Image: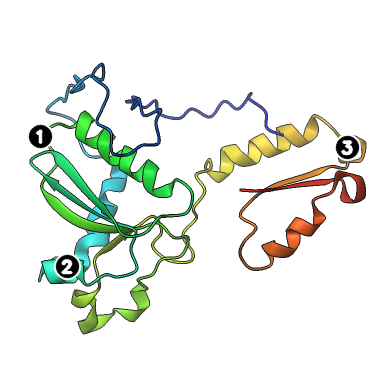
Amino acid sequence: MFSNRNKHEYPKRDEYLLNCTSSNMTITCPVNYPPTFNHTFTSNETCPEYFRWIHEDLKTWKKKGITREMVESLKDTHFRLVIVNGTAYVKRYAKAFQTRDTYTFWAILQLLKLYPGRLPDLDLVFQCHDQASIKKDKYKGRKAAFAPPQFHYRGDDSTPDINIKPWIPLEKDFKEGNAMKNWTSREPYAFWKGNLHTGPRQKLGKCNSIKDWNAEIVNQ
């Protein structure tokens, strides 16, 4: 249980939504969708602090660059994205889990709409699995320049994949929520939702019984 009385302020972000109500990815943007967004940039604007990680992630190929052969050598990948003159072309090699690849496509379309003409031509491959298929520790020293250039949501096994608040305001939410009702007076009921097809989670589905376990287990 979380409290909405948290006074921690977060920076507001502009929202640029895509009207993508259909799962058919072969359709074009609706005719009523604006071709561009009038986003004004001032001369004193600077890149966000986290942009430095872009240089950190790409420093492996800074000296020798990335060749087409390196891109095409990647086999364990979900799709390949090519952007030429502001138009995106996608070739899907495998279906990602649920809608991970679909939402990635939408994010790319939002970038193209928000920054028309500002995205450079590019050619990249993307993988949407939980675990990264390219391990940094296998490409150190002289081998670093030959690391396969695969984009991914996670850098290694220690990268968190849940977008939560910073710990200080989150801890405050926990304390305020717990103070609203004692644990001994709460209803003994458990709810869990996730993928039941991997590892020990397969056994968790056997506990899905309100009558026997007071637990509701939902396969996602």
- What residue does disc 2 label? 61
Residue 31 location, quadrant? top left
Please tell me which residue lies in front, 200 or 149.
200
Q: Which residue is located at x 23 percent, y 49 percent?
A: 90
Answer with left or right where residue 137 lies relative to residue 195.
Answer: left
Earlier in the chain: of badge 2 and badge 3, it is 2
Identity of the residue furthest to the bottom in this view: 142
Please tell me which residue lies in front, 152 or 29.
29
Callout 1: few (<14), some (14-19), or many (20+) C-alpha neighbours within 10 Å?
Answer: few
Callout 2: few (<14), some (14-19), or many (20+) C-alpha neighbours within 10 Å?
Answer: some
Residue 110 location, quadrant? top left
Q: Look at discs 2 and 1 and give the one toward the viewer.
A: 1
- What residue does disc 1 label? 117
Is the Cβ of the residue at disc 2 closer than 8 Å to that at disc 1? no
Identity of the residue furthest to the top in this view: 32
- What residue does disc 3 label? 187
Image coordinates of residue 81 in percent, x first then y, are 22, 52
Identify the secondary structure beneath mark 2. helix
Q: Is residue 40 above or below residue 96?
A: above
Q: Which residue is located at x 28 percent, y 33 percent?
A: 27
Callout 3: few (<14), some (14-19), or many (20+) C-alpha neighbours within 10 Å?
Answer: few
Earlier in the chain: of badge 1 and badge 3, it is 1
